[in-house]
Amino acid sequence: TFARMYAKSVVCPHTSSSSSLVNTRRRLNSSERARRTPRTRTHVVAMSAAPSPKTVGLIGAGGIMGKPMALNLLKAGHTVNVWNRTQSAADEVVAAGATFMSSPAEVCAASDVTFVMVTTPEVALSVAEQAAPGLSTGKGYVDVSTVDAGTSNKIAELVRARGAEFLEAPVSGSKKPAEDGALIFLCAGDEGLYTKCKEPLETMGKAHFFLGNVGQGAKMKLVVNMVMGSMMGAFAEGLALSEKSDLDPETLLQVISLGAIATPMYAMKGPGMIKGNFPPAFPLKHQQKDMRLALALADELAQEMPVAAAANELYKRARRDGCDDEDFSAVMKAVKKM
């Protein structure tokens, strides 16, 4: 299995030349290991030239993720058609130059390629059913929502039945990466459409992978979010234990930031968790949904996941306590109640 990957070149002003050399050596060592491992190879590819879509649609343009994605497409000079269930939520995007359409089908009919960013598998399937009449040969439909592989395959069937091409491309990243055009797209489906979408993918993201047949992107996203949710649960427990132990949680953040377990997520979320502030960058209800879908995938494959299962119980408790629309780091509230 070959996973194709594109990543933007990023220069970090805080990185010294010596650390860059170390990182380069690490990448080279990783490449050597990958060449010796026959199961999966990940490599950077130069995507072949293909006509970029002149007109781009975005369904879900009023959401936490959809709005900044649409704005970035507009800033890059794309003609953008949008639809959102609550029209007023897309007012900022329309004010920036997008055209609001009356239905998902109208967006697809007026666009070369349509991106879809919605909240749940049920909504994604419903939107695809509404969008299908606007699809035809030569058009593309790219669902960047986080859904299970089964739902993604159902959407692919609807799209391809109309003669259009389909790509699933769930994103890794939340509100800030969406605003910065730094999302990671995990793509699978029609490779021709993947190639055509090079320009908008690079406008909205810092990297994109092509993983093969429909379903592989969905599975990769669920694995990533399962790991993220489990990490956040353990991090919340660590902060709670430090407080109970009369340790300064701010000092704990410093200690963690200097060691092997340092991650941008801990550095970004930790201060707010200590203060009890949880503005939604990635709503907790969506994190719990992704944990549920990942556990369902594991059940299908008879893969035990006791750590993820325990973390999921924390998110369920937080949901029962009314934290649905707070950031997923609000799992801290559930930990403190135990």
Image (cartoon, rainbow, N blue to C red):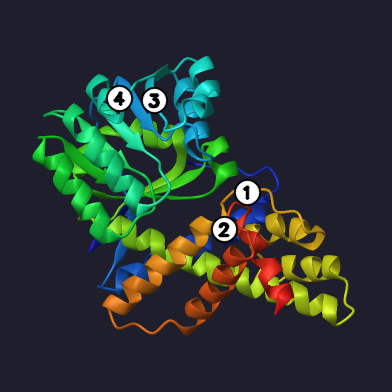
Task: Reply above or below: 170 against 198.
Answer: below
User: On the image, numbered disc 1 is attached to which residue?
Assistant: 280
Task: Reply above or below: 231 against 163.
Answer: below
Count neighbours of disc 3 (C-alpha within 10 A) and say few if under 14, some if 14 to 19, many if 20 or more.
Answer: many
* Image quarter of the C terminus: bottom right
Q: Are marks 1 and 2 in contact (CB under 8 Å)?
A: yes
Q: Are marks 4 and 1 in contact (CB under 8 Å)?
A: no
Q: Amino acid at mark 2?
A: Leu
Name the residue rendered at 19%, 52% in the picture. Answer: 154
Side of 338 where 294 appears, left or right: left
Q: Position of residue 228 (x, y in %)?
A: 53, 65
Task: Reply above or below: 55 against 2.
Answer: above
Return the disc, 4 or 1, that comes first in the chain's sequence. 4
SS class of the residue under badge 1? loop
Q: Position of residue 311 (x, y in %)?
A: 55, 75
Q: Amino acid at mark 1?
A: Pro
- Out of 257 and 217, give the one closest to the viewer: 217
User: On the image, numbered disc 2 is attached to which residue?
Assistant: 284
Name the residue rendered at 79%, 62% in the picture. Answer: 274
Q: Amino acid at mark 3?
A: Val
* Image quarter of the N terminus: bottom left
Q: CA distance from mark 4 to mark 3?
A: 6 Å
Return the disc, 4 or 3, that comes first in the chain's sequence. 3
User: On the image, numbered disc 3 is attached to which residue?
Assistant: 82
Name the residue rendered at 34%, 82% in the picture. Answer: 303
Name the residue rendered at 60%, 42% in the picture. Answer: 176
SS class of the residue under badge 3? strand
> Is residue 7 at all visible to an observer of this figure?
no
Please tell me the numbered disc located at residue 107: 4
